[in-house]
Every structure is written in structure tokens, then in C-alpha cells.
Amino acid sequence: GDSVTQMEGPVTLSEEAFLTINCTYTATGYPSLFWYVQYPGEGLQLLLKATKADDKGSNKGFEATYRKETTSFHLEKGSVQVSDSAVYFCALSGGNQFYFGTGTSLTVIP
Amino acid sequence: NAGVTQTPKFRILKIGQSMTLQCTQDMNHNYMYWYRQDPGMGLKLIYYSVGAGITDKGEVPNGYNVSRSTTEDFPLRLELAAPSQTSVYFCASSRDRFDTEAFFGQGTRLTVV
């Protein structure tokens, strides 16, 4: 069945450091891929998405490229800020539902 | 913009009690979902609906029931609450199942004691 595997956390970075959170997926067909972010005490919010192979999703300095050949959708940001501290979820849409990874907690320290 | 609204935000139940978690969306979305989030486990799908009158089980449906009498509302019913149902519950909706995003409510933190 469809599934998403993402990098275990927690991740702690200093401000302005480079961020990568790995995400790989298994799916039948051609799913859309998403990154969601969850701030403390809140629901998940869409960060970015890509709907087909080689698409690059981007938002707020975050980027991820849909790589069909490696079944990956890694999240990157060149320079993280304290305000980026949150839990990040990789997800795919397949069948009649969304499949989520286990989440990666990011803490950015000044 | 209300989006997806869940009530209550917090609730403590005693073992064996029942309750209904309410979820309403005002975006005229066809698809609605209930997830539970446990620490380190990501989100698990409980039930989903593809339109009014149509519901189906997700990965972890035992101990829960749903109904979808209108496009807007998708309540989740817990019968005979058990400690294993202690979790954070999220309702979400999406326009369809393809390349559209899911919109989430703020969650309900439920503790069963």
C-alpha cells in the first residue's frame, strides 16, 4: 500500500543553518506530494506541494522537488530561523486519503 | 475564513463514557477525514467521507463511529471510551482526492482516565 517514510527527529539547528529533512514514498500510480507544518498547539498547515514528477514546490524559503526516480521529496531551506521551529510532516495523496509520515521535530536555536 | 472548525478543544472522559467530537467546514469540500495523532506515530486515519451519506473506515476505526448527513458536518462518535483512545484528534477536509490540499482543524485533545 501507499506509505511515506521520513527522517527521524528531533533535529536541532542554529539560526541560519541549512536544513534538510528526508522523505521517501511508496505509491501506486502518480500521487501528489506535500509538506505540512504543525506549530505547537495547532493543526497542520500546508507548507508546499508538488503534483507531478520534477515539479518543485516552494514557500517561505522552503523547497522540495518531486523525484520519481528516487521516490523522494526532501524538504530543504537554506537558512533557518527561530520561527521555523515546528514539526514537519511529509504526505502523499493516494486512493481516497492522505498518507502522512511520522513527523520531524525541528528546533532552531538563536 | 472559518475553514475547518472542531469542538471541543479539550476534554477529559472517564472510562466507559461516550462523546461526540464535532467538525464543520465551510469550504463546500466533498472529502472529510478524521485522524488521530499519537506521539511519535504521525497521523492515523480513523474514518473518511467522500460526500454526504458516504463514509468508510480508515486504518484505525475500532471504537469510533461517524456520520455525514450534510456536506458541512462530519461528527466523530466515541462509544465506551478506553484509555487507548487518549490522543489528539484532527478533522480535515479537501475538495477532492487528487492534487488539492487538506485543510485541518485545530484539534481536540482527549484524555480518557
Image: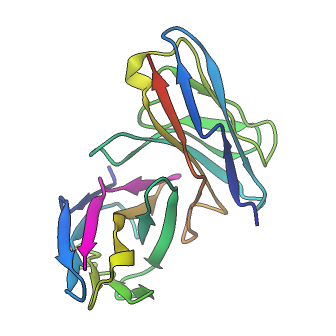
Magenta stretch prevailing secondary structure: strand
Query: Residue B60: horizontal and vertical position, in percent?
Result: 42, 32
Q: Is residue B29 magenta?
A: no
Closer-to-camera residue (B106/B46): B106
Quadrant in the picture for residue A80 = bottom left
Vertical order, B42 against B112 (above or below): below
Q: Is residue A99 visible?
A: yes
Vertical order, B60 against A24 (above or below): above
Closer-to-camera residue (B48/B111): B111
Please report the residue visible at 39 percent of the width from the left and 62 percent of the height from the top: A91
Determine whether, in the image, residue B17 is placed left or right of residue B72: left
Query: Residue A67: horizontal and vertical position, in percent?
Result: 27, 81
Closer-to-camera residue (A84/A8): A84
Determine whether, in the image, residue A40 is placed left or right of residue A90: right
Quadrant in the picture for residue B27 = bottom right
Query: Residue B80: horizontal and vertical position, in percent?
Result: 54, 11
Question: Which residues, given as a range, are shown in magenta?
Answer: A96-110
Query: Residue A104: horizontal and vertical position, in percent?
Result: 27, 61
Please report the residue visible at 57 percent of the width from the left and 35 percent of the height from the top: B10
Total marks placed: 0
Determine whether, in the image, residue A14 is placed left or right of residue B17: left
Please report the residue visible at 42 percent of the width from the left and 66 percent of the height from the top: A37
Closer-to-camera residue (A61/A75): A61
Please report the residue visible at 25 percent of the width from the left and 80 percent of the height from the top: A110
